[in-house]
Image (spheres, rainbow, N blue to C red):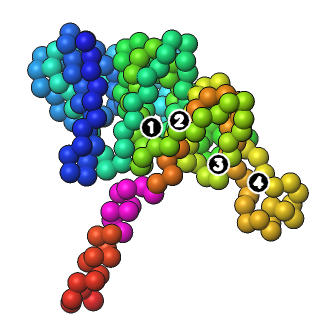
């Protein structure tokens, strides 16, 4: 039985996958190290798959690790979150958020509406996961879950890491009228409408936070000028 665990070592988060004659799919380059009788399979893409990957900028090959043992994925100062997909459920993930998934999960490209793709900061293509099984996603910091029940979420910026596939995503003006937009200081906002969940990362990227802290400490030391 496959088990996925998120471990914390000092400030780093690491994904540990326990395989018992099982298989797991990961993002290209996600493997850190593995122990046991595990083999990596990388199936060559078809011509159409290769062209689709070039257009969407999705990974050409997502390797599959099969066997028995322990697989560890690249650590991060950010966060990992596990989404448990139920049958028939779909999620749209931010670019670069996908890390790994069970074999019952389909990983494909999702195309946003042209206007949303241009102005949202999310791009034309994102990653769609569907099917059934666990999905590991990465984020800059801790995620907050926003539950929508036939309602609307407005986000100023591209802080949404993942959203339920049935939600309607588009770009809108923050206020009605040009004058209101100018006076409010807000321009375009991302909106999510319908029933489902949105995972947002309100925290500053931890790598930047730690770098700023270390820089401040270094400058405060005597003789650092």
| Residue 127 in view in this figure | yes
Q: Residues within 10 Å of mark 1 (few under 14, many from 20)?
A: many
Horizontal and vertical percent position of residue 190: 68, 45
Can residue 208 be found in the magenta stretch? Answer: yes
What numbered label is drawn on residue 162? 2
Q: Which one is earlier in the sequence, the residue at label 4 or at label 2?
A: 2
Q: Which one is earlier in the sequence, the residue at label 1 or at label 2?
A: 1
Residue under numbered circle 3: 155
The local secondary structure at tag 1 comes to: loop
Residue 80: name its quadrant.
Answer: top left
Residue 2: name its quadrant.
Answer: top left
Which mark is nearer the camera, 1 or 3?
Answer: 3
Q: Quadrant of the N terminus?
A: top left
Q: Which one is earlier in the sequence, the residue at label 4 or at label 1?
A: 1
> Vertical placement of 162 versus 10: above or below?
above
Residue 150: name its quadrant.
Answer: top right
Q: CA distance from mark 3 to mark 4?
A: 10 Å
Q: Main secondary structure of the magenta part?
A: helix
Q: CA distance from mark 1 to mark 2?
A: 8 Å
> Vertical placement of 215 versus 33: above or below?
below
> Vertical placement of 219 versus 178: above or below?
below
> Vertical placement of 54 versus 89: above or below?
below
Residues in magenta? 204-212
Residue under numbered circle 1: 97
The local secondary structure at tag 3 comes to: strand
Horizontal and vertical percent position of residue 13: 28, 43
Cβ–Cβ under 8 Å for marks 1 and 2: yes
């Amino acid at each position: 039985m496959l088990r996925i665990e998120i471990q914390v070592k000092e400030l780093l988060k690491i994904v540990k996958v326990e395989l018992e004659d099982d298989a797991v799919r990961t993002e290209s380059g996600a493997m850190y190290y593995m122990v046991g009788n595990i083999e990596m399979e990388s199936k060559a893409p078809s011509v159409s798959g290769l062209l689709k990957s070039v257009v969407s900028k999705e990974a050409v090959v997502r390797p599959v690790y099969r066997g028995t043992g322990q697989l560890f994925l690249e650590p991060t100062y950010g966060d990992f979150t596990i989404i448990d997909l139920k049958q028939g459920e779909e999620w749209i993930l931010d670019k670069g958020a996908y890390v790994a998934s069970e074999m019952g999960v389909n990983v494909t490209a999702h195309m946003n509406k042209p206007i949303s793709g241009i102005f949202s900061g999310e791009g034309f293509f994102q990653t769609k996961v569907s099917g059934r099984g666990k999905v590991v996603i990465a984020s800059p910091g801790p995620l907050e879950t926003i539950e929508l029940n036939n309602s609307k979420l407005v986000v100023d910026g591209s802080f949404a890491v993942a959203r339920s596939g049935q939600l309607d995503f588009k770009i809108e003006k923050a206020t009605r009228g040009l004058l209101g937009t100018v006076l409010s200081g807000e321009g375009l906002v991302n909106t999510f409408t319908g029933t489902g969940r949105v995972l947002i990362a309100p925290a500053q990227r931890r790598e930047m936070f730690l770098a700023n802290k270390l820089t401040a400490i270094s400058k405060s030391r005597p003789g650092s000028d």
